[in-house]
Image: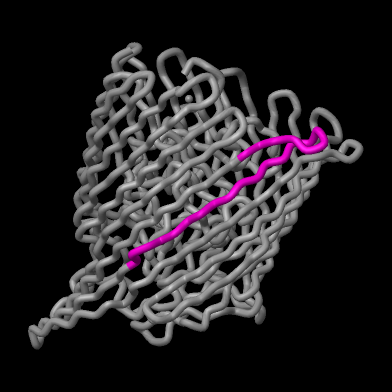
Amino acid sequence: MTPTLLLPILITSNTSIESIEVRAAKDLLHTNNFNHTKANVVSSNKVTTANNTIADWLTKIPSFSLNGQGGLYQSYSVRGLSRWRIKTSINNIPVLTDRRAGNSASFIDPSLIDTASVIAGPSSMLYGSGAIAGVVSIESATFQAPTIKLSVTNSDNARSILVANGGDKTSFAFAHRLADEGLAANKETLYSAYEQSSASFTNKTKINDKYTLQTRWLGSLSKDVQKSSADDFLKKHSIYPEDIHSLTDISLVSDSWVLNIFDHYQNWDSKVTRVGKRENLTSYQSHTIGSSFYKEDKYLSAPIRYGFDWVSRVGVKINDKEKSFSSNSLYEKALIDGSYHNFGSFIQGAFAINEIEFNAGSRVDAIQLNNLKDSRTEQFLSSNISAKYDFNNQHSSLISVGNAFRFPTLTELYFNGVTPRGVTLGNQNLKTESSTSYELTHSIKFNEVEFKGVYFKTRLNNYIERISLDENTRSYINLDKAKISGLELSAAYMFDKNIKSTLSYSTQTGENEVGNTLNDISPTKMSFITEVNLDNFQFITDIYYRGKHSEVGPAESTLASVISANINTRWFINEELEISMGVTNLLNKLYRTTADEDAPFTNERRIKLNVSWHRF
């Protein structure tokens, strides 16, 4: 019997199953009063892939796809949009970096993460600039007792350890992981080695019956993180020699409002070596500081919520050192010395007319950006309105219309230097990118069957496209118009309280005003996930299909279709000890991770063994 035929038989606790939880967006008080915009939430025990990155957690969500090059800092796209068009946050701290690939959150070890979620669609009304595609949110884990986790993986010899402890109020943890270079199914070397140490601390104190104070900190130090790509390693290779992050969030929570302040310090380097020619070491440093206030109330008996967000990036410094191997000369240059300030305020209401539920809201953002002697300002109004109608207990439809925006980043405007892809030139004439999106959702619930279908269409103005000026030089331009549309389908069947299967499908198209395909459009994909709990055992199988991708963007290559599979099994030996094993790329297929022109092959079949102990 072939492995593929075995998969449905290997179909995953002793309670009912929920593979992907759905929560209302930015529902900081958990009231569910504004539930038209939903976040798909994945917890750590539902991951079937290698679980090296946050992107590994979210690939089962129809709107989410891998994007760009590979390695630990794998980037991603949501509904055909990637990089700075996706708002990424950790513990409600916006992650703003200067990586051209976008704001990856993989500088934090996944063992310190509790949940990761995706909001697909325009979200600037709640989250401001950069949420054109949606939002990826990450929440750190807390530990209630002494905990130790160990894992080893073949192929790339990855190994990791987590040591944690905690109680009712305080939790702390330390994690360390490292991996050697990997192998593709054809035994080609994948330069994806890394070493990373991470730590977390949480304290939650109930001041009195009304107020709770919570402090959270996450820190990480990554070393020698290789950027996996299709480049010839003997001619050019890229590495992140050091990457330091520290994130602090302090929140005061009452029954009706939340106030928080946060800080994100980052200091990291990127080194590109062209063998026999030159070496470029680019240093990046910045501080993201800010605060937000969120409150829920009622107006004429209808729920409303409002708040403000302040985000500033200060001390943004990017410096480049170039060493020539032929002349042994050293050249240094300050590329960026700037800052970014954003203040936004929003209000949203929920009301009903006859039997139709409405959510409507608006947000105003003011942005100022500075670099050396140059300064730019921008104001933008974001709005969203949605209407939901329940035909009966089984059928409901939701229509949503919203706009969003993205202010050009310091890097896109001013960076003129060397990156792992080559020379990148900023464009100071870039305009603010904006979008208008339409979405129609229909849901069906009938006995043990759940079905959901989503059609979306996004029209973009001043779409910022990365272009190639020559073989080794890239820059950015505005396209006057662009459009993306797609269809997402999912069907779930609960056989009984312990067995559930989910089938999902997504397809997208995207083109500019003259009909040329945009970069980052995801290939058609389909997945079939089955989860079963049998006494002390849990099994998850994931069969994955990616369709042929022949209509590609200017910085992409075509992809052949592929069928792959992952499995994960957990054995609960007793209340304190658990052993799990996962197999990624079970069929040992050879295929590229994404359509990016520099994307590497995916890893060969990998087996990961985990042992977890916690005092009960």
What percent of the width, then of the height, locates residue 344? 58, 56
What's the magenta bit mostly, secondary-structure-wise?
A: strand
Residue drawn at (47%, 77%), measured in percent from left and top?
A: 375
What percent of the width, then of the height, locates residue 411? 40, 72
- In the image, 572 versus 202, the foreground residue is 202
- In the image, 36 versus 159, the foreground residue is 36
- In the image, 477 versus 576, the foreground residue is 477
Residue drawn at (64%, 79%), measured in percent from left and top?
A: 480
Could you tell me how many numbered marks the image carries? 0
Q: Taking 591 as reference, is 10 above or below it? A: above
What percent of the width, then of the height, locates residue 583? 35, 38
- In the image, 393 versus 427, the foreground residue is 427
- Compared across the picture, whether 282 is left or right of 354 comes to left
Q: Is residue 254 magenta?
A: no
Residue 365: quadrant of the picture: bottom right
Q: Farthest residue in the left direction?
A: 328
Stretch in magenta:
295-316
Q: Does the magenta stretch include residue 304?
A: yes
What percent of the width, then of the height, locates residue 253? 52, 32
Residue 279: quadrant of the picture: bottom left
- Compared across the picture, whether 452 is left or right of 601 comes to right
